Image (tube, rainbow, N blue to C red):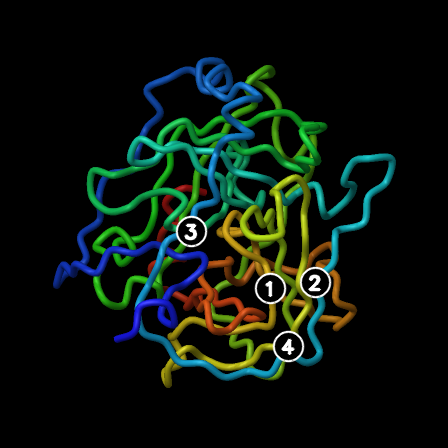
Amino acid sequence: MSTVSRVLLLAVLALGALATPAAAAPKKNPKSPQETSAYWSSERMKAAKPRDRARPGGGGGGKPTDWSRYAVPLTGGAYTAETRKNGKVFFTLGGGNYVCSGTAVDASAGVNLVWTAGHCVTDGPGQEATNFLFVPGYYKGQEPNGRWAFTVLDSTPGWEAQGASRFRNDVGAARVVNTTSAGASFASTIGTRPISFGQNPTGKRLVSYGYPAAGTFDGSQQYACASPFRRWDGTALLDPMQISCDMTGGSSGGGWILDANGNSVGDAGEPVVSVNSYGYSFEKTTMYGPYMAAGGEAQALYNALR
């Protein structure tokens, strides 16, 4: 295998494989929400690195036509309506501080749930993120919708096991609470997006949101890619999905919205069906995300934390 041509932009690296996925207990936050927030000084936020690693091998395919990358429109310097449900994620893992992206999704009454990538939550058994903080609508240092610290976070058994097929299950989730108002909820402040499992994307369009922070991006604002579904990263229905997108590290975990009306915007009521997971270095304008099967590990994670 060559070295440069097989580097990926977004996903996590480890090649070791555990033969049978085993679910680890969800990680509980030993800190108070206020302590988690206090950890994230402006200096630490600025210094946090995009969560990007490497994965060898890969396919290819998909033409960079009919795709777009654009900054999410702003109103008065802040995101509004659907775009404020997307946010920037800050966390510590393996002694380093990182950034990813996430989405506020529907959950039971009293639960505020963030949907993100597995590699923004854990690197395997005993390697769970700490200091996980969600800042919805983050824009150039502004935090118009407050800070939300995790109380519990988890990923899928398939991702935690770090086996060969882990990228099929690269999703994670966190329950969060507002760090200044214990009674605040997503429902009363920013709203939430529906989430759907078992949505075959063939012949459909998707809109991906995130906070890319590597390369020419600086992580200061949201970007979005609108694209038709391109192909599977393999031959099976359950393989990760490909869209056209040039976002980089830091966008990991940002939601893929099923663009039902084909207007290249994630409108109200359109569900999250995947997340930004990885992209090959030799495909500068493509992104891959896991297919969240009905009754699969992603849905089991959602049901456990919702």
Measured as percent of width and height from the top left, residue 220 is found at 65, 39
Residue bearing the label numbered 1: 246
Mark 2–mark 1 CB contact (< 8 Å): yes
Q: Earlier in the sequence, mark 1 or mark 3?
A: 3
Measured as percent of width and height from the top left, residue 68 is found at 71, 68
Q: Residue furthest left?
A: 19
At x 44% / y 62%, what residue is drawn? 278
Report how far apart the C-alphas of labels 4 and 1 lie in the structure.
14 Å
Give the SS element for disc 3.
loop
Q: Earlier in the sequence, mark 4 or mark 1?
A: 4
Report how far apart the C-alphas of labels 1 and 3 lie in the structure.
14 Å
Residue bearing the label numbered 2: 69
How crowded is the residue under tag 1: few (<14 C-alpha within 10 Å), some, or many (20+)?
Answer: some
Q: Earlier in the sequence, mark 2 or mark 1?
A: 2
Give the SS element for disc 2.
strand
Residue bearing the label numbered 4: 228
- Residue 52, numbered circle: 3
